[in-house]
């Protein structure tokens, strides 16, 4: 078979070609179409098919780009919706957090009816190696005065107002090296002084000094404001004792205190403008 095809294949192809041409001629004569016109039509037919294919391909490309543009517009609209939902979620979280603080303050108010407070937001922080202050958006126009205490919603002491303008005030926190507040160890009623200390401020801690009997303190002891002298309200939580240390001279001991207020992350505080004085 292979030999037959190899020997006579060219003649077979030639015969097939003659038959095709003959069929075209017969078809043209039988249909009444001029021969040359029919031959031209036969020759042009593949090109017409190719042109139709190209036109369809171009149309499909146009449809593709139209779909891409439509998807891009839809994507942009969805991005805008997501951004708006995220904004609403942030506002909802902010409102929820503020409501939580106000509920806690309401609970504090029911426990400490002697305290009159004004809400304020933290607008600026200033922290250095020896200073720790926050600026609030309330001032003398809201009844704020130098010497007022700042507390969080739980009644934990944040610091004391040391400067004030019409619509702002500066609070020196309990961590500041210039801070010095009369304090009492709640468990033992031992009177002392809560002070900012240079070596502790970077760790977010302060010192309890002027202790008469430091050895009686234990880790976890609560330190509160004494209220003596009428400068600050009594019973505000300052912090808890974490350890005892001896000063550089080796003569006196002091306690390291971790504040109860989360000073580094405060966004809202409450300024105590009136309170009952401890006699």
Image: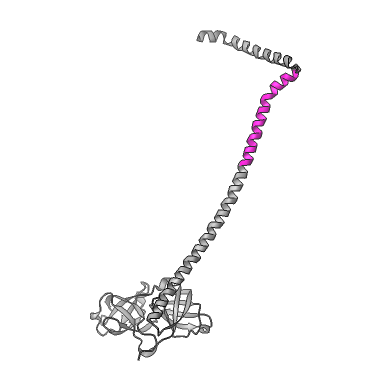
Query: Vertical placement of 195 versus 88: above or below?
Result: below
Q: Is residue 127 visible?
A: no
> Which x, y percent locates residue 261?
38, 75
Q: Is residue 275 visible?
A: yes
> Which x, y percent locates residue 223?
32, 80
What residue span does the magenta drawing correspond to? 36-63
Q: In the displayed orientation, state which residue is furthest to the front.
A: 110
* Residue 123 is covered by the magenta coloring: no
> Which x, y percent locates residue 263?
40, 74
> Which x, y percent locates residue 49?
66, 28
Position of residue 254 in the picture relative to residue 33 (left or right): left
Residue drawn at x 66%, y 31% as measured from the top left: 52
Residue drawn at x 55%, y 57% as measured from the top left: 81
Q: In the displayed orientation, state which residue is furthest to the left.
A: 215
Q: Nearer the viewer, residue 1 or 275?
A: 275
Residue drawn at x 60%, y 44% as measured from the top left: 67
Picture quadrant where residue 45 is located: top right
Residue drawn at x 63%, y 35% as measured from the top left: 57
Position of residue 22 in the picture relative to residue 112 (left or right): right
Picture quadrant where residue 17 is located: top right
Q: Main structural element of the magenta stretch: helix, strand or loop?
A: helix
């Amino acid at each position: 078979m292979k030999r037959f095809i190899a020997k006579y294949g060219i003649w077979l192809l030639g015969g097939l070609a003659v038959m095709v041409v003959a069929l075209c001629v017969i078809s043209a004569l039988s249909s009444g179409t001029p021969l040359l016109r029919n031959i031209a039509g036969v020759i042009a037919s593949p090109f017409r098919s190719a042109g139709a294919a190209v036109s369809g391909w171009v149309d499909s490309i146009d449809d593709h780009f139209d779909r891409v543009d439509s998807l891009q517009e839809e994507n942009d609209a969805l991005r805008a919706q997501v951004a708006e939902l995220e904004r609403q979620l942030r506002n909802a979280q902010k409102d929820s957090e503020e409501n939580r603080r106000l509920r806690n303050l309401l609970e504090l108010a029911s426990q400490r009816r002697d305290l009159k407070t004004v809400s304020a937001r933290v607008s600026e922080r200033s922290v250095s190696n020896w200073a720790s202050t926050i600026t609030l958006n309330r001032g003398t126009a809201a009844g704020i005065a130098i010497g007022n205490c700042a507390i969080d919603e739980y009644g934990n002491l944040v610091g004391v107002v040391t400067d004030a303008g019409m619509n702002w005030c500066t609070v020196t926190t309990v961590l500041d090296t210039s801070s010095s507040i009369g304090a009492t160890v709640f468990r033992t009623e031992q009177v002392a002084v809560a002070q900012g200390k240079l070596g502790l401020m970077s760790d977010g801690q302060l010192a309890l000094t002027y202790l008469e009997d430091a050895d009686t303190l234990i880790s976890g002891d609560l330190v509160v404001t004494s209220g003596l002298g009428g400068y600050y309200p009594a019973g505000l939580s300052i912090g808890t004792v974490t350890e005892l240390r001896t000063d550089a001279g080796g003569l006196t001991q002091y306690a390291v205190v971790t504040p109860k207020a989360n000073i580094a992350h405060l966004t809202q505080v409450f300024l105590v403008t009136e309170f009952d004085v401890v006699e």
